Amino acid sequence: MAANSTSATSPVTPSGQASAAPAASSSAFAALGLRPELLRALAEQGYDTPTPIQAQGVPAVLSGRDVLGAAQTGTGKTAAFTLPMLQTIAAMPADKQRPVRGLVMTPTRELCVQVEESVRTYGKYIGVRSTAIFGGVGMGNQFDALRRGPRIVVATPGRLLDHISQRSIDLSNVSFVVLDEADRMLDMGFIHDIKRLFAMLPKARQTLLFSATFSPEIRKLASSFLRDPVSIEVAPRNSTAQMVTQTAHRVDKDAKRQVLSHLIRTRGWSQVLVFTKTKHGANRLAELLEKDGITADAIHGNKSQNQRQRALNRFKDGEVTALVATDVAARGIDISLLPIVVNYDLPNVPEDYVHRIGRTARAGASGEAVSLVSGEDRPLLAAIEALMKRTIPMRPLEGFVPAAGTTDASSDEGITRRPDVSGRGGRGGRGEASASDTRGAGSRSGQGRGGQGRSGSSGAGQSRGGDARGAQPGAGAARGGRSGDGRSQSPRPPGTRAEGQRGDGVRSGAPRGDGVRSPAPRPESGGRPQWASDPARRNAPTAAPVARRPAAVPALLRARPHDAETHSGGSDSSV
């Protein structure tokens, strides 16, 4: 049974002792070498059988080894490091100064609170004081809590650095360090703070890293913080819980809100966690759902901790049907028996999808994850499927199927091929184009790529020209791009032919693709420039073309957006 779930409760005798049944069933935990005080707390919570990550992780930590632990969401990773840490610290000799012995760092405030609650729950009878320090609230109460001498501190990196600068906490005696949701803690949003904090810690320490996802890059980085670690993997890498039913619906981007309202109403969803990419989007969606008559609230990094906690409590208590969240709620938030998770926007980072849908189907329960996929989301969906090594079924929604021919209806990675107004032209006649047909778009071109600087006018026009973007929009026979579709605004005298034009867009009295004008035609040459009849000059190299604009970087290759959801410096950016 997962350690963070409260769905199962064992009977308790009037004296406060757990009844015989759960006490006897705790023998499975006793086999891990845990103390009776911890077994008693576990029995009171109804936990009788350790999960795979607990069965392997607890003995490894008790043996003093560093641990890199990976397990699916909702499988009790918190207990896997909390139980042995409590037992080890409780066995340490008493010290009048009561120094901090255990440090747990989390990426979000909510997870910080939740982990510290687990420490207090499991350590109820073992006499180890703990406290949580995080941003979004005043520091006064945290100063008081630290003065009382907690032996275990659970913290977010930003607020922990604040207390260090205020000299309200001393890390020189820490013997246990835990990074919960370690992959997020070691990404670019936190890594600089983590390195600063580890530099302040004793060299002789035990370090534990736990998460549901570890990319190869994060594993390599994690090795720099660990000493001869034990690697524990109880499920395929980056896999999701088997009890989560995953489906996707292809919809128009502009119809997503209507689709979400429709699903909530028609399927009778009473509690649904909805993920968006941005904080503004979360606020906006919550407002629109309220207008649709669906009680909703939003939670994200721009809200104070009190506002976030209030929204989360209302959701847990059933006062709110839809909680709209950014990925601040994707890590470690435990909502008992949450039935539905909706990906209103797919995440840019595939691993975040695993953590999002891990909010449902926790502790062996079942759950459903629904993704609304527009055309521009198709590459993100492909990356998620590649990470999980499985295909998410795509099911149409009656009444919301994207119209044919739209980007959202396209099955080719969500990209609809548009008319080729500035791209590769067809094979034209050999120099038979008239003055009115000389387009950089290539309607009569000799294999010219108007959009990429190849001329589309010459009958033998296969020569490469300058940049497709001329200095004057709409001018230039070889000009590509969108403006004016490359149509010349300076027609040649009647009767002239296109056979003398150069592939680089140099033409009579008209700008080249690179914006350089050629000499005006001389009347005695019949409208043709003098160099057109001079083979040496006609074949001379032209001015260097303007460098092409770099292609846009695909969304999947961009750095993770760091909004205010991740720490980026300052006194308290940790969430």
Image: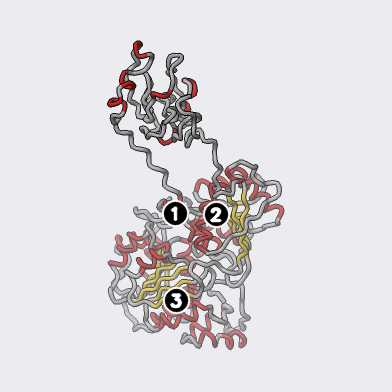
Please state if 31 lies on the left or on the right of 243 as rendered.
left
In this rendering, is residue 299 above or below 481? below
- Which residue is painted at 42% across and 28% down in the image? 458
Residue at x 53%, y 56% (from the top left corner): 382
Report how far apart the C-alphas of labels 1 and 2 lie in the structure.
Answer: 13 Å
Q: Quadrant of residue 318?
A: bottom right
Kind of residue at badge 1: Glu
Q: Would residue 441 be seen by someone viewing this image from the given angle?
A: no
Q: Nearer the viewer, residue 432 or 336?
A: 432
Q: Are marks 1 and 2 in contact (CB under 8 Å)?
A: no
Sequence order check, earlier mark of 3 and 1: 3
Q: Position of residue 40 (x, y in %)?
A: 53, 83
Looking at the rendered structure, which numbered label has been put on residue 232? Answer: 3
Residue 565, numbered circle? 1
Say what secondary structure mark 1 lies in. Answer: loop
| 3 and 1 marks in contact (CB < 8 Å) | no
Q: Which residue corresponds to mark 2?
A: 275
Work out whether 37 lies above or below 516. Answer: below
